[in-house]
Amino acid sequence: MEVVVITKRGTLIGRMQPIHNGHISVIKETLKEMDEIIIGIGSAQISHTIENPFTAGERILMLSKALTEHNIDPSRYYIIPLEDIACNSLWVAHVKMLTPPFTKIYSGNPLVKELFQENHYDVITPPLFNRKEYSGTEVRRRMLNNGNWEKLIPKSVTKIIKDINGVERIKYLNQKEVSQL
Ligand code: ATP
Ligand code: MG
């Protein structure tokens, strides 16, 4: 009898502004359970704000270099930018349209969990690693305050942020508008 092997695919979605060591840990853990992972770059259309400083293209570059740095086999992941849509009730269909087929979604976000559960997906809430430090908000806070943000992210991501003057971008965006005299 022929044995049919079905590829186990799971999805993880984050804005990844920027990618940090917590994202890398959860990706590695997910790949212990699944054959392949789909990494969705959320709010792909947003950039150049304090909370979302980097473009989807910059985030794709950061993620692919970080996964290479961590020796993760490129045949095991897909990096897919996901723009927001106005209707939450249609969001799962929107994600489904843009991604390879998957059965499990890894998320701690209540809205993401609720929407995928309603659509009968298997929803997993992965543990958070060192959440006090490994958070996008903390990385951006340290960038603004000249703290040690480099420690929280892969070396290859630090290099990209320096190449694109990312810290200067955040500091510039944080300035108050000044009127011309
Ligand atoms: P921000 O503070 O900008 O919201 P974030 O650190 O929460 O950034 P997101 O880009 O919002 O990261 O991605 C959210 C997803 O990334 C979460 O649902 C979770 O699955 C995963 N994640 C984020 N931080 C960690 C962490 N420290 N450990 C494990 N997973 C994490
Ligand atoms: Mg978050």
Image: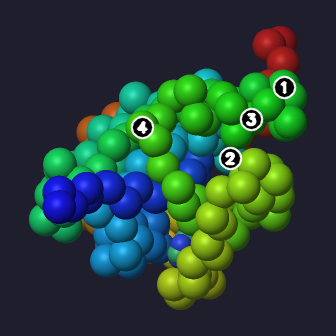
- Up-down: is 42 above or below 73? above
Q: Position of residue 7 (x, y in %)?
A: 31, 55
Image depth: mark 2 or mark 1 in front = 1
Query: Is residue 103 found left or right of 19 in the rendered image?
Result: right
Q: Amino acid at mark 1?
A: Ala
Instruction: State how far apart marks 4 and 3 are (Cα).
Output: 16 Å
Place of residue 68 in the rendered image (x, y in percent of width and height, measured from the top left): 16, 56
Regarding mark 1 in the picture, which secondary structure is present there?
loop
Q: In the depicted view, which residue is nearer to us: 25 or 155?
A: 25
Q: Quadrant of ligand 2?
A: bottom right
Q: Nearer the viewer, mark 1 or mark 4?
A: 4
For the residue labelled by badge 3, is the local secondary structure a helix, a strand or a loop? helix
Q: Which residue appears at 37% of the width and 41% of the height? A: 79
Q: Nearer the viewer, residue 21 or 119?
A: 119
Q: Earlier in the sequence, mark 1 or mark 4?
A: 1
169 or 97: which is nearer to us?
97
Residue at which label 2 appears: 51
Instruction: Find the distance from the CA under tag 2 to the CA under tag 3.
Output: 22 Å
Please say which color scheme the image uses: rainbow
Mark closest to the chain's N terminus, 2 or 3: 2
Q: How far apart are the alpha carbons under marks 2 and 1? A: 19 Å
**Is the shortest distance between ligand 1 and the CB of mark 2 under 8 Å?**
yes
N-term mark: 3 or 1: 1
Quick check: can you spot residue 156?
no
Q: Give me the C-alpha separation between circle 4 and circle 2.
A: 29 Å
Q: Which residue is mark 1?
A: 86
Q: Earlier in the sequence, mark 4 or mark 2?
A: 2
> What residue sits right under mark 3 in the picture?
91
Q: Which mark is residue 100?
A: 4
Q: Residues within 10 Å of mark 1 (few under 14, many from 20)?
A: few
> Element at badge 2?
loop
Which amino acid type is shown beneath numbered disc 2? Glu
